[in-house]
């Protein structure tokens, strides 16, 4: 059988796993993996939803953290990225026809993999774009997901060469003209630690770059106009008070205060109208909190475990104070 997951010397795949592909409602084969804890009794299963241009391998370290606490982990590469099939002939462009497809893929994953092959209760850990998808799907997940942890959910945009208003106008125009498959830029920026908005941890940054160079087929370039306009429309909907009021799953929003991708102010504003949600700021951290320096990462993990029932809350209370 062809290799499903990939390792590098400083990022080996966790053991005790099942990996493969599951079929979506429209025939795509999406790559997934389930990682089991070593204990006989599982405390539950964490379903991880990735950000844009992410893949299972990027979460190996976090998966070890979670399985080490007695939790199982189930995750998959979203359609159009990672080890899942691309949606355009150009493998470099991040594309989606509609964001609702992401939600249907999550539903299929829960039905075909998580429910039959993992252990209750189920928790959702969603980063960036994964957080946007989780917010959108949340009203329909009440009977399946017990708690949600959102890491820097993609509910706004900052740090770009153009303003969000200009980006949205350009993406909308291209999509209306039938050119939604085109990206707004063709430039591919070489990864550079010194000016990256994602993490202040150089080792973890270089570890991710090494994986990208070893397996470039897992990575993407810029998103297409269609992807962007779908993202903006979803942001509008999920941040409305009406939608937030309809979410009843207990949720924490882990918000890095130095986020260079999603404005911290947008995450703070979200929490004001989110009756089931509570903001957990991580002071000084950048966008990819689980790829950050130990002091920030430990605070985020402590918040996670304190929030998840039976997940070593007392042990992590002192560590949580590091991020406040």
Image (cartoon, rainbow, N blue to C red):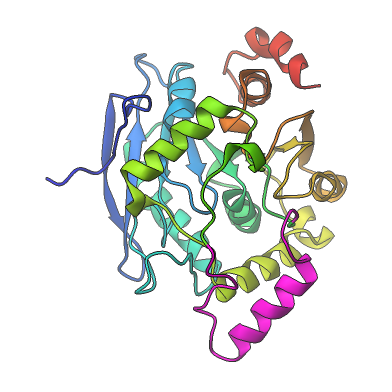
At a point 61% along the width and 19% down the height, the residue shown is 294
- Give residue 30's quadrant in the image: bottom left
Rendered view: 279 above or below 94: above
- Residue 247 in picture, x, y percent from top left: 71, 51
- Residue 114 in picture, x, y percent from top left: 39, 42
Read off the magenta span: 158-187
- Residue 253 in picture, x, y percent from top left: 72, 39
Q: Quadrant of the C terminus?
A: top right
Left/right of residue 255 with respect to residue 148 in the rendered view: right
Report the residue that reaches farthest toward the bottom.
177
At a point 67% along the width and 9% down the height, the residue shown is 314
Report the residue that reaches farthest toward the left.
1
Q: 296 or 302, which lies in front?
A: 296
Q: 273 or 99, which lies in front?
A: 99
Answer yes or no: is residue 314 visible.
Answer: yes
Q: Quadrant of the N terminus?
A: top left
Q: 53 or 316, which lies in front?
A: 53
- Give residue 150's quadrant in the image: top right
Residue 172 covered by magenta stretch: yes
Rendered view: 183 above or below 109: below
Left/right of residue 318 with respect to residue 82 in the rendered view: right
Q: 250 or 7, which lies in front?
A: 7
- Give residue 16's quadrant in the image: top left
At a point 63% along the width and 35% down the height, the residue shown is 199
- Residue 261 in picture, x, y percent from top left: 70, 49
């Amino acid at each position: 059988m062809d290799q499903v997951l990939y390792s590098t010397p400083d990022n080996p795949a966790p053991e005790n796993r099942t990996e493969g592909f599951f079929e979506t409602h429209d025939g795509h084969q999406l790559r997934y993996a389930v990682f089991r804890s070593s204990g006989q009794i599982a405390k539950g299963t964490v379903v991880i939803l990735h950000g844009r241009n992410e893949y299972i391998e990027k979460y190996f370290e976090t998966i070890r953290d979670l399985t080490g606490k007695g939790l199982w982990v189930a995750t998959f590469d979203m359609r159009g990225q990672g080890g899942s099939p691309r949606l355009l002939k150009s493998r470099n462009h991040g594309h989606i026809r509609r964001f609702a497809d992401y939600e249907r893929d999550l539903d299929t994953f829960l039905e075909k993999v998580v429910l039959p092959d993992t252990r209750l209760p189920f928790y959702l850990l969603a980063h960036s774009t994964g957080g946007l998808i989780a917010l959108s799907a949340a009203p329909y997940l009440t009977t399946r997901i017990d708690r949600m942890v959102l890491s820097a959910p993609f509910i706004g945009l900052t740090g770009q060469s153009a303003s969000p208003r200009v980006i949205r106008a350009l993406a909308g125009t291209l999509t209306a003209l039938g050119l939604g498959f085109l990206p707004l830029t063709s430039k591919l920026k070489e990864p550079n630690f010194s000016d990256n908005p994602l993490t202040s941890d150089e080792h973890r940054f270089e570890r991710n770059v090494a994986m990208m160079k070893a397996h470039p087929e897992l990575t993407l370039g810029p998103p297409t106009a269609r992807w962007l306009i779908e993202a903006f429309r979803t942001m509008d909907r999920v941040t409305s008070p009406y939608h937030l009021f309809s979410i009843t799953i207990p949720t924490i929003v882990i918000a890095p205060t130095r986020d260079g991708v999603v404005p911290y102010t947008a995450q703070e504003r979200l929490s004001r109208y989110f009756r089931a949600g509570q903001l957990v700021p991580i002071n000084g951290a950048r966008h990819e909190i689980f790829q950050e320096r130990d002091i920030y990462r430990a605070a985020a993990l402590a918040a996670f475990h304190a929030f998840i029932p039976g997940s070593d809350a007392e042990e992590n209370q002192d560590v949580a104070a590091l991020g406040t």
